[in-house]
Image: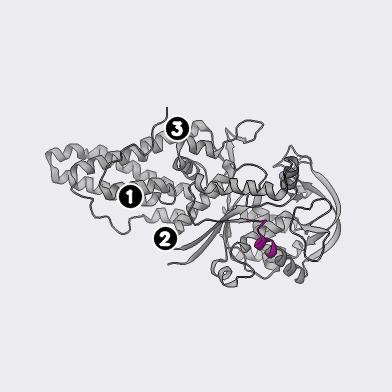
Amino acid sequence: MNKPFYITTTLPYVNSDPHVGFALEIVQADIIARYKKLMGHEVFFNTGTDEHGVKVYTKALEANKDPQAYTDEYAEKFRSLKGLLNLDPDIHFIRTTDAKHKAAAQEFWKRCDAAGDIYKKNYQVKYCIGCELEKTDSELVDGKCPIHPNLEIEIRDEENYFFAFSKYGDKLLALYDANPDFLLPAYRLNEMRVLIKEKGLEDFSISRLKSKMSWGVPVPGDEEHVMYVWFDALVSYISTIGWPQDEETFKKWWPVTQFAGKDQVRQQAAMWQAMLMSVGLPASKQIIIHGFITSAGQKMSKSLGNVIDPSKVVEEYGIDALRYYLAREVSPFEDSDFTMEKFKDSYNGNLANGIGNLTSRILKMAETNLEKTPEIPEASIPQDWIDAMEKFEINKAADIVWKEIAALDALIQETAPFKLVKTDKEKGVVIINELIVRLYAVGRMLNPILPQTSEAIKALVKANKSPAAPLFLRKE
Ligand SMILES: [Zn+2]
């Protein structure tokens, strides 16, 4: 088994505090990283921060800070997600301002250049400052970026370096044809096919004039330009595993499984893949695209006052409560709603009354009636749970756990072992043993999803003790 598995999130841009949308992405990736470890893989789990570009530069200037000092502060905020969300302790954290990363981005540029894929030209484009992306007319709605309808599209006229993206249409189509699971959900791959076949690919700008915006990786051999933030940030997926100086480590981990939001499909599945082709590196292994989190059907925004701060939720309900909602109540692939009302209902129904109550009931019976913990089988995770995880269907895997929780509740209801032990001790003990073994299997399945709860259940079962306090306190 022991097979290396490399998984990464996108690198969030450090112009605002971590929001629940990124918490979703990183918790999803954490669940898969923990799942792969559970299955015996050696895992490299990567996240980090994307720190260059005009948005960060502007924010730093507004705050009257040096951009490096500004990004240092934000990088710490994102790094603190590790504790806040109880992420895998071995998670790697790369910053695009790391010296090694900047050197890698420059080497990557040189190799694209050597492949004949970089050229300079005068350029006038429509640009969304919110996305940090050029927009073609077909991507705009009423002349505005559909993701950032409040921002004016900028018209830019300057001499820049370009990447010869248009060369790669057929090669990308061949990549998709050879790997039907390259993008999940599958319809996203069709969207890319349609884009390439019907609209074609346009070369994109990969530099900015330093005189206008100096906060970027210097372009090798041209002091007047810095790299376009996307170009540099994408290279982080390989610089974090040692490319180019540590070939052995790079080869051990590559290719990568990527998590990204639905606004990232073109960058991750096409632009980044073409860049890899340009320097002669294998494509990513798979890209998992998640939807956005809405609040009562609306986009979360400061002006609407409906932004959910993950740290507040954790403070009030605990880490596993937030992880539970993101894993089970949020679709792995589609837009999903998150309101505190729904959150509380789900918390009370499925955590306080569900797993929390069940754990207390079973362990109380065990503590009272069993001499010791029954023998726990080596493997007790059902195949359908594994199948769901393999397909990144995290909510389905969680459903399987809660179906088992319901089944155990029903078994207690039907057989009333706490009464049965008074009339037929042997029969009652057999049922309690079965409940304990199945509760332990629930603990195992919760390992990637609710790590603290999983540990608590397994430890209590082994100690044959009922919990001193409920695992999840009911909230009024
Ligand atoms: Zn935009």
Question: Which amino acid, mark 1?
Answer: Lys
In the picture of the structure, the residue carrying the numbered disc 2 is 39
Query: Ligand 1 quadrant?
Result: top right
> Residue sitting at 49 percent across and 39 percent down?
314
Q: Quadrant of the N terminus?
A: bottom left
Residue span colored magenta: 95-103
Dot 3 lies on which element? helix
Give yes or no for residue 470 being in the magenta stretch: no
Residue 475 visible somewhere in the drawing: yes
Q: Which mark is residue 311?
A: none
Among the two numbered marks 2 and 3 on one chain, the one whose residue lies closer to the N terminus:
2
How packed mark 3 is, by other alpha carbons closer than 10 Å (few <14, some 14-19, many 20 or more), is few
Residue 150 x/y as whole percent: 74, 37
Specify whether 20 is left or right of 88. Answer: right
Q: Which circle's residue, 2 or 1, is located before the other in the chain?
A: 2
Mark 2–mark 3 CB contact (< 8 Å) = no
> Which one is in front in this view, the residue at disc 3 or the one at disc 1?
1
Q: Locate the C terminus by quadrant.
A: top left
* Horizontal and vertical percent position of residue 112: 74, 67
Based on the displayed image, in which of its 4 quarters is residue 250 positioned? bottom right
Give amino acid for label 2. Answer: Met
Q: Could you tell me which residue is drawn at 73 percent across and 49 percent down? A: 132
**Mark linked to residue 458:** 1
Please state which of residues 235 and 422 is positioned toward the viewer in this rendering.
Answer: 235
Alpha carbon of mark 2 to alpha carbon of mark 3: how far? 33 Å
For residue 345, which numbered disc appears in the image? 3
**Depicted 376 relative to depicted 238: above or below:** above
Residue 103, quarter of the rendered image: bottom right
